[in-house]
């Protein structure tokens, strides 16, 4: 007995997978980030893995995302959050540009403050300014910080998209850990606008595709923090825009190579949106290995786009993409690092990070 014919849904899913495979295979790495012909393909790129020193969390329970932050004890999420905070503390300590007793770290999109608390408590010589649009989360952060001695934390309720945000004169680095969607890009803009180093681990890229609303919704609404303002363009870089134009032109059998006028902005946006969704959750019903592979490649494109956009707009920045250790199957393991090239101490720290090439 022959098997039943594939359903219309199965055919559509197979077609979407094929199209995404073709798109991911067509994208060439950005030369503006220093990639050459030997690492031209996404499949050839090995993102170095960051190995940060462990923090003895049991000796500092109030700083611990599990104990003080009330994440479930010994849970995968709690273990990941510990590693994330350790990584940020390690990188920030390497990049500091002011004497340590004068420095201020900016946590852009801090939420309730697992990163803020960890950096302020573990790096006690540095103050931390936590910025978030969610005032309730900042109140929770301040309450938790009040229990920790020598913990220099200030909070600021503000929209990261506000170009009038004033940072302290001793601000030394801007951090952003899993600020959803466009909030990460706003954090990067905050850093580059003030010519500061940045350390960011983005998440939920597809949320950037929703147009941000400021009327009729409370500041605690997730999409209010995550959606892109009308003047924030995706893709973020000319590099990825050109790569998507090439793909769309080839898909439509255009006779004019790289003719950007032949492709609508809507088609470009829709293609990037599909890429962003795959970067978040993978590509449809698949085996776990297939899911991770597609998600990894799409996420790599999205984060290279962010870094390429920074360098295209601010040619004085040196940037690096790394992955967190022990996050092999986790979809939000990338860390974006950038420093102005005239900040010699930060450049030195960037080059001294403990990285394992070819690691998992």
Image (spheres, helix red, strand yellow):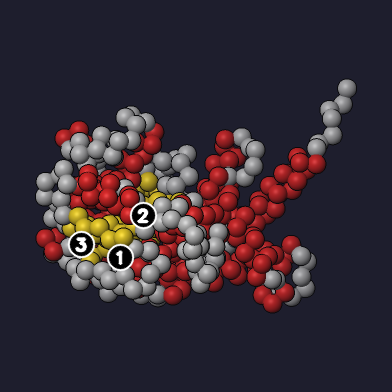
Mark 1 or mark 3, which is nearer to you? 3
The part of the image, by quadrant, that contains residue 210 is bottom right
Q: Earlier in the sequence, mark 1 or mark 2?
A: 2
The answer to whether one can see residue 11 in this image is yes
Q: Which residue is mark 1?
A: 197
Q: Which residue is mark 3?
A: 104
Q: Quadrant of the N terminus?
A: top right
Q: Which residue is mark 2?
A: 134
Q: Position of residue 34 (x, y in %)?
A: 45, 66
Q: Residue furthest front?
A: 216
Q: Earlier in the sequence, mark 1 or mark 3?
A: 3
Q: Position of residue 81 (x, y in %)?
A: 34, 41
Mark 2 or mark 3, which is nearer to you? 2
The answer to whether one can see residue 48 in this image is no
Badge 2 crowding class, 10 Å Cα cut-off, few under 14, some 14 to 19, many 20 or more, is many
Tell me the residue at 70%/53% (across/down): 19
């Amino acid at each position: 007995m022959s098997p039943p014919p594939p359903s219309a849904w199965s055919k559509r899913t197979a077609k979407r997978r094929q199209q995404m495979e073709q798109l991911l295979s067509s994208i060439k790495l950005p030369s503006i980030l220093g990639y050459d012909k030997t690492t031209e393909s996404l499949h050839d790129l090995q993102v170095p893995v960051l190995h940060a020193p462990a923090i003895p969390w049991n000796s500092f329970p109030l700083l611990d995302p599990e104990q003080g932050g009330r994440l479930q004890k010994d849970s995968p999420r709690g273990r990941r959050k510990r590693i994330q905070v350790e990584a940020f503390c390690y990188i920030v300590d390497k990049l500091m540009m002011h004497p340590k007793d004068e420095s201020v770290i900016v946590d852009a999109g801090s939420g309730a403050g697992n990163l803020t608390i960890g950096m302020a408590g573990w790096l006690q010589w540095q103050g931390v300014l936590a910025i978030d649009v969610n005032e309730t989360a900042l109140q929770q952060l301040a309450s938790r910080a009040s229990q920790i001695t020598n913990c220099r934390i200030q909070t600021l309720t503000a929209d990261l998209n506000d170009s009038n945000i004033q940072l302290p004169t001793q601000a030394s680095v801007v951090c952003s850990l899993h600020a959803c969607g466009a909030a990460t890009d706003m954090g990067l803009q905050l850093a580059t606008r003030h010519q500061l180093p940045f350390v960011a681990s983005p998440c939920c890229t597809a949320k950037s595709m929703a147009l941000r609303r400021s009327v009729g919704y409370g500041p605690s609404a997730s999409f209010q923090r995550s959606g892109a303002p009308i003047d924030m363009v995706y893709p973020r870089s000319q590099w990825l825009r050109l790569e998507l134009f090439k793909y769309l032109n080839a898909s439509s059998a255009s006779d004019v190579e790289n003719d950007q006028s032949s492709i609508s902005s809507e088609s470009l946006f829709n293609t990037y949106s599909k890429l962003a969704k795959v970067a978040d959750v993978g590509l449809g019903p698949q085996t776990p290995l297939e899911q991770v592979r597609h998600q990894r490649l799409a996420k790599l494109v999205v984060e290279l786009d962010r870094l390429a956009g920074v360098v295209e707009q601010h040619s004085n920045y040196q940037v690096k993409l790394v992955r967190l250790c022990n996050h092999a199957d986790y979809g939000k393991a990338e860390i974006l690092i950038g420093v102005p090239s005239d900040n010699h101490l930060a450049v030195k720290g960037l080059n001294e990070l403990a990285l394992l090439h070819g690691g998992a």
